[in-house]
Amino acid sequence: MIEFRNVSKIFKSKTRTVEALKNINLTIEKGDIFGVIGFSGAGKSTLLRMVNLLEKPTSGQIFVDGQDLSKLSEKELRQAKKNIGMIFQHFNLLRSKTVFDNVAMPLKLRKTPKSVIEERVNELLRFVDLSDKANSYPNQLSGGQKQRVGIARALATNPSILLCDEPTSALDPQTTTSILQLLKRVNQEYDVTILIITHEMEVIKQICNRVAVMQNGEIIEEGTILDIFSKP
Ligand code: ADP
Ligand code: ADP
């Protein structure tokens, strides 16, 4: 589903050169809830941003559904972006728009008919249990509710991949658990493959089936949760 093949990324400026990713090889299978854990600066965001076409490898290849991302036409690129949703640590909601309009945004940008938008957004708001907040604004919501809006928005275009950038780092432990349970339902009920980057071990332990441990731009361990956590 997502494959990194010998991927390296070098950031060069006048004063310094950073090798953010060093020869990464990684396969994320369809249906996985895959966690990438590591300290700040390990290269996790750079890895994630490449799947979303926000960053290009210096060398190596990334395949999504068997397609080499560097070889896509304009049209295929638009399709690829529609197929990938993303949620963020600080939710990234538009403050001036209601919950409904935040979730509708990706569909409006794609010129989706109004009636289709209505139906889809209402379905997603039911799924994240926020139907009663459709006309509220983000600053009227708790952190957990904001992230649920983020999840609904990420699912609007019916993607098969959801990228999660520190999805619970701004939330308390109880809210974290409820968001992780919701992500599990996204995985199961919407058939979405999930890639999560985090520095929180709890996140990995609660929902991931596979995990990669990153350090200084390298994957130093990879396997099932049992593989990684049963080691002495
Ligand atoms: P993490 O997400 O694990 O904290 P990052 O992928 O953000 O790690 O960063 C990995 C390394 O790459 C860090 O040393 C960071 O400073 C560097 N880096 C990331 N993005 C850029 C950029 N746009 N320009 C220069 N250096 C960058
Ligand atoms: P969640 O479990 O979704 O994070 P909380 O239990 O934190 O929700 O919030 C409970 C209720 O308090 C919610 O109905 C929410 O509307 C309200 N609430 C929480 N934080 C705020 C806030 N900053 N401003 C207005 N209402 C809030």
Image: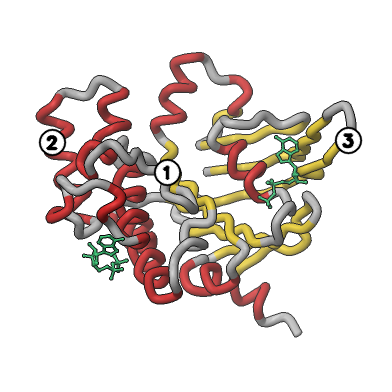
The answer to whether any part of residue 161 appears in the image is no
| Closer to the camera in the image, 71 or 54 | 54
Compared across the picture, whether 93 is left or right of 222 comes to left
Q: Name which of mark 3 and mark 2 comes first in the sequence.
A: 3
Dot 3 alpha-carbon crowd within 10 angstroms: few under 14, some 14 to 19, many 20 or more? few
Left or right, 132 with respect to 35, comes to: left
Q: Which mark is residue 106?
A: none
Question: Of the residues under marks 2 and 1, which one precedes in the sequence?
Answer: 1
Query: What residue lies at 53% left-to-right and 35% top-to-bottom?
Result: 52
On residue 92, the disc is 1
**For mark 1, does the 10 Å Cα neighbourhood hold few (<14), some (14 to 19), or many (20 or more) residues?**
few
Task: Indicate the position of residue 122 as horizontal and vertical percent values.
Answer: 14, 45
Q: Which residue is mark 2?
A: 118
Q: Nearer the viewer, mark 3 or mark 2?
A: 3
Check residue 16 in the rendering and tell me which mark sits there, or answer none.
Answer: 3
In the image: residue 147, left or right of residue 12: left
Picture coordinates of residue 35, whole percent (x, y): 57, 60
Type of residue at label 3?
Arg
Residue 65 percent across, percent down from the top left? 51, 37
* Label 2 secondary element: helix
